[in-house]
Image (tube, rainbow, N blue to C red):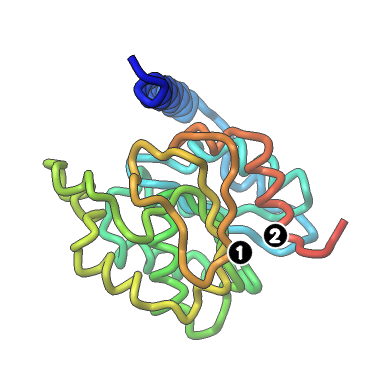
Amino acid sequence: MGERDVRTRIRALQKAVWWAQDYVYAAVCQVQGMLSRVQPGSFHQGHRSPVLIIPGVYENWQFMMPLIRAIHDEGHPVHVVTVLQRNKLDVPVAARMVAQHLEEAGLRDAVIVAHSKGGLIGKYAMLNLDPEHRISRMVTVCTPFSGSRYAKYMLLPTLRIFSPTNALTLELAREEAINSRITSIYGPFDPHIPEGSILPGATNIELPTAGHFRILGDSETARIIVDQLNPGQP
């Protein structure tokens, strides 16, 4: 076996380990979310700019609890859109719910922090549903801005929408006017998004933590997000 073959096998093994760790993390978070008794209103206090959380598909808001706590601890009021439940709605429908929450809660200069599909919802809202400019910018984690080639193999419509050839995916990808207001965070390997999460014109930040889910619980992810929420502030 040549040196190249050895390196290839090591990389494949490393990806398999990352994949397994990712799903263990997701399973634990799903269980913790179901058992959680934390009320969303308990994070509404804060003196800094408000933050609106949008989770990924099949995730409730509690799935992003590590980031919610870290952001709130830094003085930001944190809001969640509970009517999204497990985020299985079409992107435009979910985006309208996000816009409605922003208006009803009276939020201005708000920053969206989103995971995966949540970033597509956030971008749709920024482009089409924010006439009063309530959203200042968005920070995303592992969002499939260019889609995922795996989506075409999925049976469920809620997952097939992530196809690179999906009309909405293509529409959002073409619209680059607001990309400068977006920070996209991702790791070196995402088992769900082989295309990656680089967004042209955005602030793209690669972290060392691999995975689609586990990166949400990494302390460096929280630190980077807080830095992006408060640029130039101690």
How far separated are the C-alphas under marks 1 and 2?
7 Å
Give the residue at x 47% y 27%: 29
Give the residue at x 44% y 58%: 119
Q: Is residue 170 left or right of residue 175?
A: left
N-terminal of the pair, mark 1 or mark 2, is 1
Judged from this view, the residue extending furthest toward the bottom is 131
Q: Amino acid at mark 2?
A: Leu
Q: Position of residue 107 (x, y in %)?
A: 61, 69
- Dot 1: element: strand
Q: Which numbered dot is residue 15? A: none
Q: Amino acid at mark 1?
A: Val
Q: Which residue is mark 2?
A: 229
Dot 2 surroundings within 10 Å: few (below 14), some, or many (20 or more)? many
Q: Which residue is mark 1?
A: 111
Seen in the picture, residue 145 relative to 38 is either above or below; the reply is: below
Q: Which circle, 1 or 2, is nearer the viewer? A: 2
Give the residue at x 45% y 34%: 211
Q: Nearer the viewer, residue 112 or 45?
A: 112
Q: Position of residue 95 (x, y in %)?
A: 38, 65
Judged from this view, the residue extending furthest toward the front is 2
Q: Position of residue 1 (x, y in %)?
A: 33, 14
- Contact between marks 1 and 2 (CB within 8 A): the answer is yes
Residue 67 in sight in this render: yes
Residue 129 in sight in this render: no
Q: Position of residue 175 (x, y in %)?
A: 38, 78
Give the residue at x 56% y 81%: 133
Dot 1 surroundings within 10 Å: few (below 14), some, or many (20 or more)? many
- Dot 2: element: helix
